[in-house]
Amino acid sequence: MKALAKCRGKRGRIARAFRLGGWGWVLFLICGAPAAAPRQARQPSRPVVVSPRLAAGIAEFRQFHFRRAAAAFRAVELAHPGKTGALLWLAKCRINLGQLAMAQNDLETFLARKPRSDDALSLLGFVDFRRHHPHRSLAAYARAASIQPPLGDDYKIMGLDYIALRDWKHARRELARAVRLEPQNLQAQYYLAWMQYIANQFTPASRRLQRLARAEPRNLNVLTLLGLTLEAQSHFRRAAAIFLKAIALEPGLQARNAQPYIGYGILLERTGHPRQAGRQLRAALRIKPASFRALAHLGHIDLMLNRLPPAERELTAALRLNPRYRPAYYQLAQVYRREGKITQERLALQELAKLPLHNVPQ
Amino acid sequence: MPMKRREFLRWAGAAATASVLASAPAGAEPPAPAWFEERTAAAGITFRHRASPNPLKYLISTMGSGVALFDYDRDGRLDIFLANGAHILQPQPPGTLPRKLGPAWWNRLYHQDARGHFEDVTEAAGLAGAGYSTGVAAGDFDNDGYPDLYVCGYGGNHLYHNDGHGHFTDVTAAAGVAGGGWCTSAAWFDYDRDGRLDLIVCRYMEWDFQHPRCGPDKPGHRSYCHPNLFPPASLLLYHNEGGGRFREVAAEAGLTKKGKSLGVAIADYDLDGWPDVYITNDTWPEFLFHNRKNGTFEEVALLSGCALDGDGRTFAGMGVDFADYDNDGRPDIVIGDLGHQMYPLYHNDGAAGFSYQTYSSGLGAISARHAGWGLRWMDYDNDGRKDLLVTQADVLDTIHLIHPDLHYRQTMLLARNLGQGRFADVSARAGFRQRWAGRGLAIGDIDNDGRLDAVVTTNNGPAHLLMNRTPTRHHWLRLRLEGRRSNREAIGARVKLTTADGPQYAEVTTGGSYQSSSDPRLHFGLGRQALARELEIEWPSGVKQRLANLRADRQLDLIEPEGAAASQTAAPAQSDGDA
């Protein structure tokens, strides 16, 4: 849940155009994917003053004792202002502690002293990314790249910045670079697969995800995205098998995850099994009652089954959660028409007309 | 560790749904016979479509051509007309049109003789044509008993009058139906019920040969441009004024909406006695023009639930058919579109409008990886339920470079109607294993054996004559209606046929499918019933006719009776074509 809360802000910007009916999936895919970790491959700038306290702080940091490490770095910095790399280490601790504003201050102070520290610039780019400032993040990475070639993780974050800016072309480019530089970077692989999925490049996406699923067979997000990708290629049985595998794993997770149920529910809906689809979507709603997608598809299923009052209720609830979800307006209009509520039907269609027309991609 | 009860329930639920998908009727083949035999070469048909594809990827060269199945000489046997392309220059200079440089580019008329052999009679018939031909619509516009031909094309259309002696005369100029732009499909219908056939013409887009380069900038990756790059075009509606003259009335009839139309089908969807029009558009909302009975139409597709797919999205609407597949008396709509879009199936729910049944019918799962062009409802095994035959292929010959899981050439689809609104794919069982770049499709009983056959066109390839050899003991009845007060071909007549198994419904039309024109005779499969208890005909003039106790397995030739209503309990005036 903490991870979900962290990415909530970014989702809003990312969530827009998505193939098969909206960008809602983006939310879970980005949120559910492993959180982007701060860069760590590069060594910190060489300290001018060698301090035993600094070495102790680094040792704490490497054992993930970030609070203790931060205290040590703070002390070193106070004792030798600007003479060591402690401020940079402190920023790293703060990033790991989620103190992003403070980390940014530290980095800006550090960069005022050492404007050509590519390490600090890259970290600043990462902080800007985490603080939902993709333009600033990209600018910082660009400055860092002018000093030192970026690492795979840097490209990954730049790719995510471009996703936030809905610049799919550049996002794909940066993620592809990340994967080329670091083929073992599973996060970069995942995000690249996701970009390929939303760009309708289903075949390379599913190949990549199959490799990822072999490397991380219990990663629910990888499995769910693989299921979606297979479904998009109309490999319904294979998609169903993957969703079922994810559903089998899901109860064992610490944090419940509704997405495999939603994915499988939609698959069943599209392949002509509305009642079974309804069961999966209701399971998803028990885990995540505010899933507009599960509600909308449940509403559609009830419309298909001519159960109009629940359909109206579910579609209305879905639209309360996501007023820009086009399919729900269309389906709600059909519910109203069947109920003889002509005025409401027209209103729903008017709302539909306000949203950009989506073509089903081939 | 013992399994907890809740966990067990969840697992049980998942296993149950898994088994549902594994045993899904969609895609599964039921034990039903189906067999179509390719007889093209054996029957003497040598036609080959010339699309003139070139590296500049002019869109028109992937859109294919149509076919008409019609009995132009009234010998009781269906003949075949095939539209053909023309030579496209590389590049085609501004202001010029492709030309038919020689016989390879001619349209072709094949006459069927008594042995089922087809003879090319194009030259004698005067139907070689001009320009880049696309669609075709057959209809007897002057009520002389001989069906005429309207041939669509790019840059101008042609109306050919059938003189009844094997020759057609180009009467385009006198009739005033040349049109312009890029015409795709057309259909004859009598929208004002004055007894004369009118003509509706689809135009695809405002397109010319000066379009940009499309597709990735890599060798071999240039592709045909997406329709989004071009503005929509208007429809044409020609009112038959009599005396061989037509007047273009689209605007005054309310057909003012511009679209990107590729297909047209006609049916009286609200059963008010007046023909309505459904138009498919490519990446544009579909149109349903409701006939207001006063010479005008109102576009009601969105309010009727048949403008968009089930999620409110547009799709690449291509071929279309508008007929009652579930025998509830109301015509339904099925459309061909591109891969991953699933063929839209709109069930006519009466006053509640149309409902999107693609998913629940199983047609979605069947069609998800295909692209459908020409398509028609047809009861291939005479079991009393209309099945669906579809020509399939992608629009892009480079589709595999974009989606390796899709193919340009695809097999035909035969979707068997299982009843209760469900369909199953029986294509392989029907012998459809070869992949073609399918486009046009016309349906009719070519050998008059009581089984519906088909002719298929392919883009830049041969036509295919598919003879239905499905082994079946099911009975059938074929009707050829001839109007008197109504238009001569009785286009728009509605028929209800009732057997001990229940009623079936059909309307006379030559339209539907994609750029093609089908046999106007009505075909009913009667299943195990050798007797039709009752036949009710509502002629376009409003005359109602009722016949009872009709023996099966033959063709009935019925002439519109005089008077407001007629009832016969004995055999009709004449019958022939017994199997």
Image: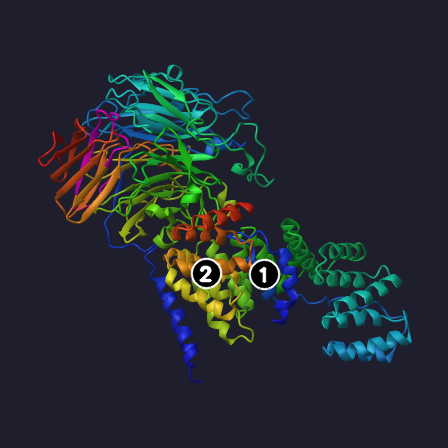
In which image quadrant can residue B159 be found? Answer: top left
Q: Residues within 10 Å of mark 2 (few under 14, many from 20)?
A: some
Residue shown at the point (63%, 69%) measured from the top left: A3
Residue position for label 1: A27
Nearer-the-camera pick, B151 or A23: A23
Residue shown at the point (45%, 63%) measured from the top left: A264
Q: Residue furthest bottom?
A: B1
Above or below, B199 relative to A122: above
Disc sitting over residue B179 in the figure = none
Query: Same chain for the residues at labels 1 and 2, yes or no?
Result: yes
Q: Position of residue B270 (x, y in %)?
A: 32, 40
Residue shown at the point (9%, 37%) measured from the top left: B569
Above or below, B509 relative to A136: above
In which image quadrant can residue A182 be found? Answer: bottom right
Model colouring:
rainbow
* Chain letter of the residue beneath label 1 in the structure image: A
Whether label 1 touches label 2, CB < 8 Å: no
Left or right of B44: which side holds B320? right
Q: Position of residue A44 (x, y in %)?
A: 81, 68
Type of residue at label 2?
Arg
Q: For the residue labelled by badge 2, is the local secondary structure a helix, a strand or a loop?
A: helix
Q: Position of residue B340 (x, y in %)?
A: 45, 49
Residue position for label 2: A313
Q: Which residues are magenta?
A: B465-494
